Image: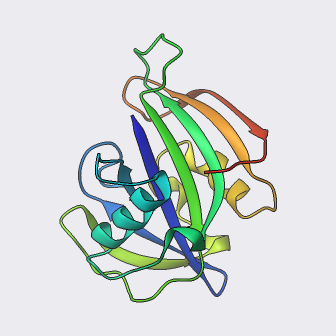
Amino acid sequence: MKATLVFPIKNNQILLAKKMKKVGAGKWNGFGGKSELEDVSIRHTACRELFEESGLGIQTTPEKLIAKAVINFYFFDNQTNEPNWLVAIYLVQDFTGEALSTEEMQMPTWFSIESIPYHEMLPADKDFLPKLFGEKTFIGKVRFNQDMTKVIESDYSEMPLEI
């Protein structure tokens, strides 16, 4: 399944919120979700999901998204070459509005880059999130254990992206 993840950035801070549903419930995360048929591109999906999950608070446009990574996520029982989730990851610095809590994402909070709460995030986040702040773009592969508390396999490679 194709999905997006967007991390708003301003003044050397990153905006995260507590995810309330599905994979990662109760953990800090960026804003995102799966593509839908009416979305023209994965960038449009990212903008739509950011807007919806931020309580209709944060707006941006596809060309303002900074493509940083594509990560293929595999769950423990998936032994195929097809990922459970193929996630396009973006940063965005040019946006308007402020995030509000929603049914899906609660307590939007700005964290300094140095104080990101990795211990309250999914285990792969501490591996890939710091890479987003570098100059390079990358692709990755992550396989979780059965209850998604550990990464049992991961690999990241620098690569130019057009997403």
Task: Let me know if residue 16 appears in the view.
Answer: yes
Q: Quadrant of residue 18?
A: bottom left
The foreground one among 129 and 55 is 55
Residue at figure coordinates x 56%, y 49% from the top left: 125
Coordinates of residue 99 in the picture (x, y in percent): 35, 81
Which quarter of the image is occupied by the N terminus? top left
| Left or right of 30, for residue 54 | left
Residue at figure coordinates x 43%, y 39% from the top left: 2
User: What colour scheme has been applied to the protein in the rendered image?
Assistant: rainbow
Residue that extends furthest to the top in the rendered view of this protein: 79
Coordinates of residue 33 in the picture (x, y in percent): 36, 52
Q: In this view, does 127 lie above or below 157?
A: below
The foreground one among 125 and 149 is 125
Coordinates of residue 136 in the picture (x, y in percent): 80, 55
Q: Is residue 84 above or below residue 112?
A: above
The foreground one among 138 and 100 is 138
Residue that extends furthest to the left in the rendered view of this protein: 103
Residue at figure coordinates x 35%, y 65% from the top left: 48
Task: Let me know if residue 31 appears in the view.
Answer: no
Q: Quadrant of residue 47?
A: bottom left
Count the marks: how many?
0
Q: In which quarter of the image is residue 133?
A: bottom right
Residue at figure coordinates x 29%, y 46% from the top left: 37
